[in-house]
Amino acid sequence: MSTWLRSFCDKRGREATIKLVLVHPSTDPKTSASGGTERRRESNRPHDAFEAFHVEFDYLCRTLQRLGIRQVDVEDMVHEVFLVLSRKWLDYDPGRPLRPYLFGIAFRVAARHRRKHAREIPGDVPDVADTGAAPDQVLSAAEARALVLRALEHIALPRRAVFVMHDLDETPMRVIADTLRIPLFTAYSRLRKARREFEHAVTVLQKGSR
């Protein structure tokens, strides 16, 4: 979670909940997206596409949902990502981080899927990982995650991709620009606009739920 997003959540008193469902959503602490685990992954890179897909399966599912893929379609779309990854594995430079490379594939798969289907705002509440929290806290986490996913739907996909990569995945801007094949200035411009759109969407959605 970026400094900007942490500050945004903190202003709304939702920082802990949103951090729980967006930064540590995995049911297995060994495969959570914590910095320490990510560093261990980077030092022990997968040897083939299947291993990369297996290690980052949860990350790919989260990414596809954040890019607007409905939960019921995630399984099919993550399979599409694997097929592309298998074809392009030899193009992957093992000296570079794996997740941005996977994000680029997921982004293009999601974009193709969304072009084929009418745009829909997800109405289902996504599953929430078992964090050992009390029932009322789990419900709050489900509501927070649903709120974030609905807010992301109000951001056009090209800007949303930059927002997700930077403010949720904490990917450096130069890596984002390279991954999405856009100029660095364009990446920063999309991030600024996406942040405004996200903040506005969350405000509107919260008011509408009262």
Image (tube, rainbow, N blue to C red):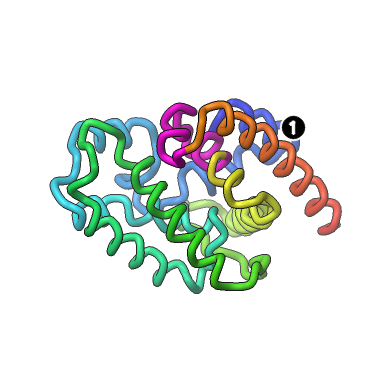
Amino acid carrying label 1: it is Lys
Q: Residue 152, relative to residue 19: is it above or below? A: below
Crowd around label 1: few <14 · some 14–19 · many ≥20 (10 Å): few
**The magenta stretch spans residue 47:** no
What is the secondary structure assignment of the residue under circle 1? helix
Q: Can residue 106 be seen in this view?
A: yes
Give the camera-side residue of 209 and 94. Answer: 94
Highlighted magenta segment, given as a residue range: 163-181
Left or right, residue 3 beside residue 182: right
Left or right, residue 44 beside residue 145: left
User: Where does label 1 land, which residue?
Assistant: 11
Q: Residue 89, relative to residue 75: is it above or below? A: above
Q: How many labels does the image show?
A: 1
Residue 121 image point, x, y percent: 68, 65
Q: Is residue 140 visible?
A: no
Which residue sits at x=57%, y=26%?
185
The quarter in which the C terminus is drawn is bottom right
Which residue sits at x=78%, y=54%?
205
Which residue sits at x=52%, y=34%?
166
**The magenta stretch spans residue 180:** yes
Left or right, residue 106 beside residue 138: left
